[in-house]
Amino acid sequence: MPKTAAPKLKTQYVCTSCGSVHARWSGKCPTCDEWNTLVEEVVEEQPAAGRRILALGTRPQKLADVRADAIQRLPLPIGEFSRVLGGGIVPGSLVLIGGDPGIGKSTLLLQSAVLVARHVGPTLYVSGEESAQQIKMRAERLGVGDSELYLLTETNLDAVVSAIETMKPKLCIVDSIQTMYVDGLQSSPGTVTQVRESAQRLQAIAKANNVAIFIVGHVTKEGNIAGPKVLEHIVDTVLQLEGDRFQSFRVLRSMKNRFGATSEVGVFEMTGDGMREVLNPSEAFLAERMRHAPGSTVAVTMEGTRPLLVEVQALTSATQNPMPRRTANGFDYNRLFLLIAVLGKRVGIRLYDQDVFVNVVGGLTIDEPAADLAGAIAIASAYRNVPASPDLAVVGEVGLSGEIRSVGQLNQRLNEAARLGFARCILPKTARQVERPPETLQLLPVRSLGEALDVALGQ
Ligand code: TYD
Ligand code: MG
């Protein structure tokens, strides 16, 4: 009788950050140097002879002979989402959508599923997290009506794959990849092995059936998409839904896109009945501004290719602690330290005995150095208790010598400031000549932080 060897089980340690596999556990991943990221997994050892040599049938072909017809994208009737994807849904693509729990991933995807089902064709929503009743209740809030939307509450990936193969939907949504498991793998759902294997199978099924698949991915405490980096390598597009859970604005950002630019963002507002597109984000972000308050300035930042005006607020108050506090909300923490140092050294605003708080209104995070000057003016304005003029917008990066450095895409920024009714704009003097500046906007070029404070606070 031929011997059928029982599959050998072996224990290995997989890094949840970089996906590397190690034979022994250690506190620090030897590959990526992250701490506490190795987790134990039990896998079946495959005999080398059993491994198949892949793709015997494919031959190299001449690049010139490859047909590159323009991709026929499926329309997605949520404009902000569609733009972030690069102008619609690419059939056969695998898209990962990450974000903190409760930020609105399921809501946004269910809304999209409803609209695609109504306007494009059959859509399958697979949920491993919520029951059919829960989804139905949510869908009713979003106004599902009668459409070709099918629901599958399932965590077994094989069942999902066979549903896709028989139904051949235009779009399939898998919420979430961490709840799916592949039969035969020893590890439990959510582990690196399961997540990677599930994603690989979904990628293959998407390509084979020309079905677009959106998968939801949870993020870890550090804000990375859970599961190893390999997940990001497997998928075609990685989107991230960001925002402050206590604020209503949400920003959908593209981190990787094989079918479009990564610089696009979409802005949404979480409302009682789902995510609503914010077509005029600058207006929305400035809506609650107190116009004559000290410590408030308006920065003109770029979110991708889109100019966005946001209010930067600062507060300084005499500290009670030996170590003064510095708090940054939506503003880069290290840049806050830099601005405080430059203010002290170059313009004599010494904040060693002051607590300093900086906040970007609306739950938005800006990491662009072009918002430096707005931050610095806000801090100085708070410290001196002098408001900046309410019709003033600010653009510029602050250098260590207190010089104001030029920033990119100045024209778009100035046009947006003018469109929102700002009358004056501080900008770097070193910036290249602005072509056709908006007529209603007075340009105030400055060379140094001191000059900028003179112009903004008139002292
Ligand atoms: P959800 O989409 O479940 O988040 P995620 O899938 O990213 O975890 O959204 C959860 C929150 O959104 C929840 O606290 C309730 C709120 N919400 C609304 O404010 N309006 C709505 O129409 C819906 C459906 C949810
Ligand atoms: Mg969810």
Image (spheres, rainbow, N blue to C red):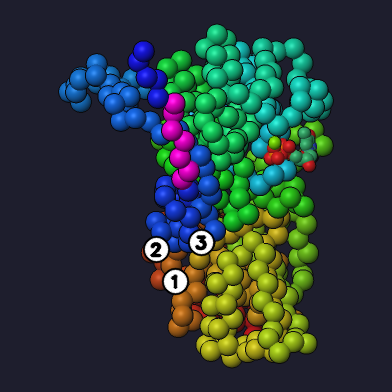
Main secondary-structure element of the magenta-colored stretch: strand
Mark 1 or 3 closer to N-term?
Answer: 3
Above/below status of 79 relative to 34:
above
Residue kind at label 1, given as amino acid type = Arg
Region of the chain picked out in magenta, as a range:
6-12
Residue kind at label 3, given as amino acid type = Gly
Q: Report x, y in % for residue 82.
A: 55, 31
Mark 2 or 3 closer to N-term?
Answer: 3
Residue underneath mark 2:
433
Q: Specify the label residue 27 is tagged with.
A: 3
Mark-to-mark CA distance, 2 and 3: 54 Å
Is residue 27 rendered to the left or right of residue 289? left
Is residue 220 rendered to the left or right of residue 410? right
Indicate the quadrant where residue 291 lies: bottom right
Residue at point 32%, 26% (across, down): 51
Residue at point 47%, 36% (across, down): 9
Residue at point 77%, 71% (across, down): 293
